[in-house]
Image (tube, rainbow, N blue to C red):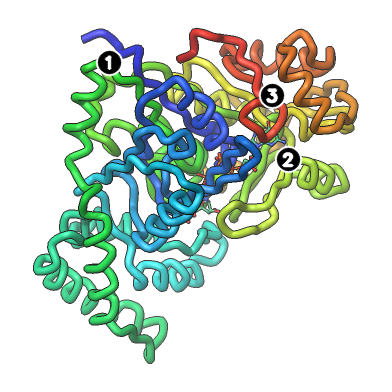
Amino acid sequence: MEKMQNTICVFGLSYGDEGKGKITDYLAQKSDIVVRFNGGNNAGHTINADGIKYKFKLMPSGAVLEKEVIIANGVVIDPKVLLDEMETLKKLKKKIKLKISSTAHVIFPFHIKLDELEELKKGKYKAGTTKRGIGPTYSDKAARWGIRVFDLIHPEILKIKLNNLYSIKKDLIRVYEPDWDVDISQIYEDYVEYGKILKPHVIDTAFYLNKAIDSGKKVVFEAAQGNLLCIDHGFYPHGTSSNSNSLGISAGTGVPPKKIGKIIGIIKAYTSRVGEGKLTTELFDEIATQIREQGHEYGTVTGRPRRVGWIDLFNIKYGIMINGVDKIVITLLDALEGINPIKMCVGYTRNGKKLDSWPIHPEIIEECNPIYEEFEGWESRTPEEWARIASVGYEALPKTMKTYLDAIKEKLQTEIAIISIGPDRTDTIVLDPSIF
Ligand code: GDP
Ligand code: IMO
Ligand code: MG
């Protein structure tokens, strides 16, 4: 079977928030279907288009353009959050063409409670989670007592599974909080109601997607989080609980690897991270404040100020290898305006020795120092000026920015497909028009 050319994966090469929402929406213009395949409402994907700012936690970003959107089996779903997002879209008079996998797992209030409590016990190994119940829900999936969307739309099955799960979770939570309880019959009633509303959207999305791809439909796979938060290949335990990169697509959708076409990794012009864990290139001075303000680096889900640092090509290179990235997208270049010089991490040393590859384990990463190269920055501009530059194209970019981009391309040995110099859909420069 030939590699499919009508599918594309968009994922973040760093710690999340690289601009997946913006780029997915951009590519959705030329696509039929957009699919979320991992994570849950720990994600916050922003799209700025037609004067409106959309923030999605579960809804695939294709919803803005009224494309078909699929929440596949690899996602964990808090039904209340999804219904709220559907309501918001309805108020904006958007047509919702949503399909939900019957095998996706469901988040319950006790998962959220456990997420909070488990973090308290983890000490320096806590991830600083979004407290949305993501980890405990994936744990239940792996332990095989999780509750799936199929169960949600079958009240008689839900009743048995929920009561069973509640009895287990109650005992567990009471180890931490002896007086804890919830009204489980109320939760059951609420979830039966959610199930009733969502039922018309529930199908076997693996079957549907494979048929759609085989018939030539164009599909964007939109990852949540970022490669460095991946449960298997990222920072463990300071990451998330799913394969938050292109590796999650097949397991998270039922679409075989051979049908996955282009793999597009997004990087920011610098690095940001929310939550715990070492950020090797982290900045703490006034440059950090400047980048944070210029890039509006505050969490979409929790509102937490994001930690920021220089771009880290060493860990990005590792992600390019793991994911087989075809091309990269660089976002938030405008947010580095007025900063001079700009530093770029091109490798790590440990005990004075240069490392061959990103060292994976947080305990080792703690002992590493970044090797920097310096680049001349570019001047500040108004958003209107950036928008005008985007409308002209690559040649209008500041010369120093082009030098910075050339260095990234050369050091990563990977071509750049798209450049983003502002939050709006139109603040985008496509270098490879054949990208999708
Ligand atoms: P995601 O989780 O990867 O979808 O990213 P988020 O939406 O959480 O965070 C990215 C933020 O940067 C959002 O506020 C976007 O609107 C914004 N953004 C994306 N690309 C650009 C860009 O090129 N320039 C600027 N200034 N903002 C951008
Ligand atoms: P998007 O899709 C940035 C981080 C949390 C925490 C760790 C584990 O918007 O890029 P979790 O709640 O998943 O158990 O938290 O992962 N995290 C994210 N950071 N962007 C995200 O999503 C994230 N989703 C989770 O801050 O450190
Ligand atoms: Mg985000």
Point 51% across, 71% down: residue: 120
Disc 1 vs disc 3: which is toward the camera?
1
- Disc 1 to disc 3: CB gap under 8 Å: no
Q: Residues within 10 Å of mark 2 (few under 14, many from 20)?
A: many
* Earlier residue among tags 1 and 3: 1
Which quadrant: the N terminus? top left
Name the one closer to the observer, 296 or 155. 155
Where is residue 344? Give x, y as percent: 74, 27
Q: What residue does disc 2 label?
A: 309
Secondary structure beneath label 2:
strand
Q: Residue 346 — which label?
A: 3
Cα distance in 3D space between marks 3 and 2 = 13 Å
Q: Quadrant of residue 203?
A: top left
Disc 2 vs disc 1: which is toward the camera?
1
Cα distance in 3D space between marks 1 and 3 = 40 Å
Point 29% across, 38% down: residue: 252
Secondary structure beneath label 3:
strand
Q: What residue does disc 1 label?
A: 216
Q: Is residue 245 left or right of residue 97?
A: right
Q: Amino acid at mark 3?
A: Val
Which quadrant: the C terminus? top left
Where is residue 354? Give x, y as percent: 66, 26
Residue situated furthest left in the rendering: 156
Q: Amino acid at mark 2?
A: Gly
Q: Residue 266 — which label?
A: none
Q: Where 33 sits versus 205, above or below?
A: above
Residue situated furthest front in the rendering: 93
Q: Is residue 135 left or right of residue 154?
A: right
Name the one closer to the observer, 114 or 5. 5
Q: Amino acid at mark 1?
A: Gly
Q: Where 183 sits versus 187, above or below?
A: below
